[in-house]
Each structure stands twice: as C-alpha cells, then as structure tokens.
Amino acid sequence: MTTTRHAMRHGGADRHPEEDHERPDLSRRMKRLIRLAGLRSGLALLALTALPAHAAHPLAHPSADDPALAPLLAMPFASDLVGAQAARRIAWVEKRDGARTLLVSDDGAPPRRLTSSTRPDGTSLWGLALSPDGRMLAFVEGGDAEYPGDTPPNADNMPLPGRQTVRVLLPDGRNLAMGDGHSPVFSPDGHWLAFVQAGTLRIGAPGQPAHTVFTAQGDLSAPVWSPDGTRIAVEIDRGTHGVIALAAAKPDSPPRYIPPALAFDRLPVFSPDGRSLAFARMREPLLTAERGKGRFWSLHVYDVTNGVERVLWTAPEGNGSRFWAPEGVGLAWTRDGRVLFPWEGSGWLRLCALPASGGPAAPTCLTPDGAEFASYRLSRDGARLLYTANPGDHDRWRAWSQPLSGGAPTALTGPDEQVTTLTTAGDDIAVMATGVTRTAHPLVLRAGRRREPALPALPAGVSFVTPQDARFRSADGLDIHGQIFLPPPGGPARHPALIFVHGGPERQMLPAFNAMGYYSNAYLLNQRLAARGYVVLSVNYRSGTGYGLAFRDAPGIGREGASEYRDVRAGAFYLGGRADVDARRIGIWGGSWGGYLAALALARDSDLFAAGVDFHGVHDLTQPDHPGLSPEENRTAHDREWRSSPVADLGHWRSPVLLVHGDDDHNVSFDQSTLLARMLTARDIPFEEHVFPGERHAFLRSADWLAAYRWTLRFLDSALRP
C-alpha cells in the first residue's frame, strides 16, 4: 500500500511511493546516510542495453517467451489523481503502452485527452494541480517526483540532458512553460501559480514568466497558500533541521520564519480565516532510543498577526511518540476550530482532532480503532470526513464517509475493489480504485451514484486468477498475511513455487492490482508466473503497513537484526508444506528491500531457496558512525548491521541469482549490486546480471520493465523448471 513521507526513523529502504511515490521526507543528511547504505525507493524505466551474463555460469537458457507480458505492461495505468476545489472536474496521468498523457473528466464522464503522447518513454508527467474552477491544469514534465532537487533523469539517453519543467494548460488549450521547478499550486482565486526549485520560491500568473519571491538555503517543499491568497508558507529542509518560512505573495518578498527549533517543522496549514498556522515539530530519535520512550513530536499554532507561537499538544510517551504518516497525509483545520492530524496513540494509525484554542483536552480520534487510514479530505461544505481505511479486514481498503461532528461511517466503495487514495472535486468524491483484473483507474462518487470515466480491461485472451488470502505464523509466533496465486488446474501434482517480497519495507501488498506503478507491474508478473505453473506467495512481512504500529515497528527489523526475514522463511515453509508444491523447487523474487530479502534468503538458506531474482537490492547495510553514539555503541551497531546483511552470509550461498539494476538509481546505490557481483564472483556462485544505463530505481521506460520481466521468466524457468 503506502509508505511514509514524514516518518522520522532510521533504516528505511525505498519508502516511496513512482508515478506514485511513497518515501519519507527526511533531512538531506539522513538521505545521504541512507544512500550510502543503499537504502531507498522511487520509480523509473529505460533501454534494453545490458551487460553480458556472468560468463562462467550462463543460466539464462532460452525458453518460450510469454506473449501476454507486452500487452499487459501496455495496459492503461492511472496515477496522480487531482480534483478541482469548486468544480466537478478531475485530472490524472495515464500511462498506456509506455506513453504518458494527461486526461480530464467532468462529473465522471468519459475522459478528454489534454496532451499528445509525443514525449520520450522515460519522461514523467507528475505534480498535477487544477485551478479552483478546474479550467487550468499545472503539471511537471520530466524530473523525478521522489528526488525533485536532484539532477533530472535521462532514462532515454537523449542527446540533451533531462529537464524538470513546470507547465500549465490554459483554457484555450495552450501548453506553456512556467520555468524549471516542481510542486505547482494555484492560489485560492486561481490568478497565480506558485512553485519551487531547490531553495527558490517562484510565483507567476498562469502562462506568464514566474518571478522569484525569495531564495533560501535548503530544499523547499510544496507551497501552501493562505485562504485570502496573500501569503505563502513553505517548509525548508536545511539538512540538520527544518524551518517554515512565511512570505507575502509578491516579488522579492523576504520571508518571515516561524520561530524555529532544533528540530524539523513540517506540514503547515492555515486556519480558515488565515490568521493562524498549525504545524508539526518532529525530532529524529537516536539509533539507540528505546521504543515508546521520549516525546519526539508536537503540534504548534502560530499567530500570523502578532508572531506568537504556542504548543498545542505534545505526543506522550508510548505508542505514537514518534511521528508517522502515509505519503500526502498532513494536517487540516476544520471550520469549527479543530486541527486534524494522524496519530498512532492506540497502536493504529488514526485521524485525530484537537481544539485549536488549546487547553487540557485529549485528542479525539475520528477514524476506527484497530484499523489504519491512508488518505482523507473534508467535504466541500466541511461537514463530513472522507477517508480510506481497512476496518474489519486489514487486507481490504475502502472509501468511507462520516459526519465530522460524530456518527457511524458509511462505506462508499465495495469490498471487491481496493481504494487507498481519495480526493474531492467540487461536491464529488474521487478515488483511485483497483481490482483483481483492473489496473488503477479513477472512480467518481456522489449521492449514491458511481461513475468510472476510464475502465481498464485485461487484453483479449488473458485471464487472471483471484489471489487467495494466506495466513501463517512466523517462528516467533507472529501472524503473517499474504496472498497466494495458484496455477490453472490440470497441471502436475506438485508445482515449483515462489515467494514474492515487496520493497519499502513500509508497504502492503493486496489481493488486486496495486495503485503504485511498481507494484502494479509486480502483481501482473505474479499472475503470469502462476499462469506458467508456479505457486506464488506474496508475503506481507513485519515492518510493512496496514497491520498496526507493533507490526510496522517490530523489534529487530532491518539493520537492527533483519527480524522480517523470519516471516519470509516461514512463508517458504508454508509453501513447502502444501500438497501442490515441490519443496525442492522454491525460489524467491523481489526488488529494493525485496531484493535485499531475496539476497538474504539465498545467503542464509540456499537449502530452502533454490534460486532468486534480486532487482536493485541492498546487500551491505553497514553505515558510517552514527552521531550521538559512543565508539563502543557504534561498534555494536556496525556489527548488528553487518550481521543483518546478505554479504555477511556469503559462505552459505550456493543457489543461482539474477541481478538487475539501473545505474542512475537514486534509491539504492548502484554499488550495492557491483559489490555483490564481485563477492559472488570470488566464491564462484552462479549469477546472471543485467544493467540499464541511465535508468532510475523503478524503471521509467516500459521497454525496461518488459526486458527485466522476460529475463526473470527465462531465469526462473531454467533454475526451477528443468
């Protein structure tokens, strides 16, 4: 499902989310540390160029290609859904047959195409913003939504370097550039468009050259307009801390800084009258900080008129003492004077509320306990809370509506479709839905009516199985969820089998297409593997989302001990105990943190896992010394990081592995794969290798997904289907 944008935690891998991203908005210092360790995630695609397979062990024997792969990867996939504030209009990005276009729909009617698909395959469209009346659409062309401050990718290896440009489509159809940058946001009256580039805030009339409001040291986040359009608030990440700047929406306006602290100030939101600003203040715990101890974040209110700032509430020790929220989830200010915020105080991520006036009141949580929410909005009249959550069944996500004043929630979507993303368009509710046979697509809801402007369907002649829920226990007794894909009937009594492990690790796989492009592709490959005779088990291992704080922040995960591998291993024993599985032919595949777990499985348990596929995985988790730790504590941390790494167990690794990596990966350092290849070569361990020059983490080019998946099928067939 999702990962975090504002998580303040060590040890993430590829948290974020591709044409939909989910990655924590950490400081630049933390990002550098993560990159050094090779941990992070994003999205991209590129060419069919590849290095030759390891000469001593040519494992990729030719096998029948899967003719369904290309048409499946060419299916339409929707992302970046946005709605107009005062009009029943939605817009989104559609990727179809490798090309990205902008579509718009009014009141759920069939969509209109706003742009032609003439850009190179590796050029992203993202960062959409509709003007309040819906008549203009701003977007970003090129760049990388996960790393907007880095050098833009050039996945197509074009003669000129890539660019990241803010563009706007005007009512007369003109498509004009506003300047280099990202995160465009229209003013409340639609007369101005603000966006940022690195440390610069720019503003301009739509279609006109933008002027600089101010430039500051650090990376700026998306601008936040005041209700009257006279002020703009932005987060500035300075690496060691984060501040919030408040500027007048006019040229050369020096910013006023909300009194900063030795912490990260995040998620600014104006009150309805524009006189106050609420925000969250977060501190980064030390690596040795005890779980549940310390008070690491608080809510604050700043009076814009007199410059007075006060603490509204501080998260207590225990559950929720560290801030965590899914990508895109921030604070909101209701018309009745309450501040809404995400909190895990009960052990589950819930949306809670506090009176903005302060006082001794404890937070009132609005969404159901024992479940998590992923996105929310207030209805246009401010009377209802609209959100997506998984109450009752943690593997099923639906859209819900309930009175903001209190009352029982009403389900807006059915149990057979997965919905994690929600927005509004005038009085309409728009969600991004997926199903067993349907990729991500918009769904418009209003007054008991539903419309699907663009309804994708499987290519002719292709059928999918309905994934079955799988439940099993890890060696330490933890209950693990997953989905199992079964081959068609009539085959052999015992099949080869595969474990699929997602990346993140803070994500959740569901029994349907995923709303994140990377995992939408993984889902269709799991379906094709099942069609080829494999039993495939997708494992939602500990450290993932959807199952509560104790599961996501379980002891010993990641570089602290790789406890999540226990769940992967338990999945293999679950498969091996099935009557329809040949326990001698169990493999594993995954990407990013899933690549890490695949490599760990082969390094620790080659007797259990006969082969593996490792897309851009993490192989050495050791990091530089951690600030604030003594030399002895750092030695202990490094030893634990090493013992949690696949390279620490290379002496037990015998099974063959397929390695695939793009060499412009900004999430997992490319040298994580070159290091592993060197170490495998030294021990004469069989591997096949492929590299995409210029490609990012989650391949931007459809041709590269197709090539990588074809290599995967051939490799697994040769290793597991003699």
Image (tube, helix red, strand yellow):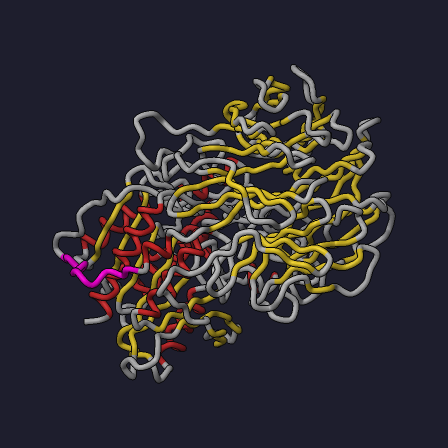
Task: In the rendered view, tell whether residue 63 sits above or below residue 96.
Answer: below
Quadrant the C terminus occupies: bottom left
> In the image, 499: left or right of 440?
left
Q: Residue at x 54, y 62 (%)?
A: 554
Whether residue 61 is in magenta: the answer is yes
Camera-nearest residue between 22 and 99 = 99
> In the image, 410: left or right of 574?
right
Q: Residue 378 placed where, x, y %?
A: 74, 49
Q: Quadrant of residue 276?
A: top right
> In the image, 206: left or right of 441?
right
Q: Residue at x 64, y 63 (%)?
A: 413
Q: Is residue 647 visible?
A: no
**Secondary structure mainly formed by the magenta segment:** loop
> In the image, 1: left or right of 387?
left
Q: Quadrant of residue 685?
A: bottom left
Whether residue 602 is in magenta: the answer is no
Camera-nearest residue between 324 and 439 = 439
Region of the chain picked out in magenta, as a range: 57-67
Please identify the residue farthest to the top as the structure is shown. 252
Camera-nearest residue between 228 and 565 = 228
Q: Residue 470 placed where, x, y %?
A: 48, 75
Task: In the rendered view, tell whether residue 93 sits above or below residue 309.
Answer: below
Q: Residue at x 47, y 40 (%)?
A: 101
Q: Is residue 677 visible?
A: yes
Q: Quadrant of residue 653?
A: bottom left
How many numbered circles does the render carry?
Answer: 0
Q: Residue 235 placed where, x, y %?
A: 63, 33
Q: Residue 93 placed where, x, y %?
A: 50, 43
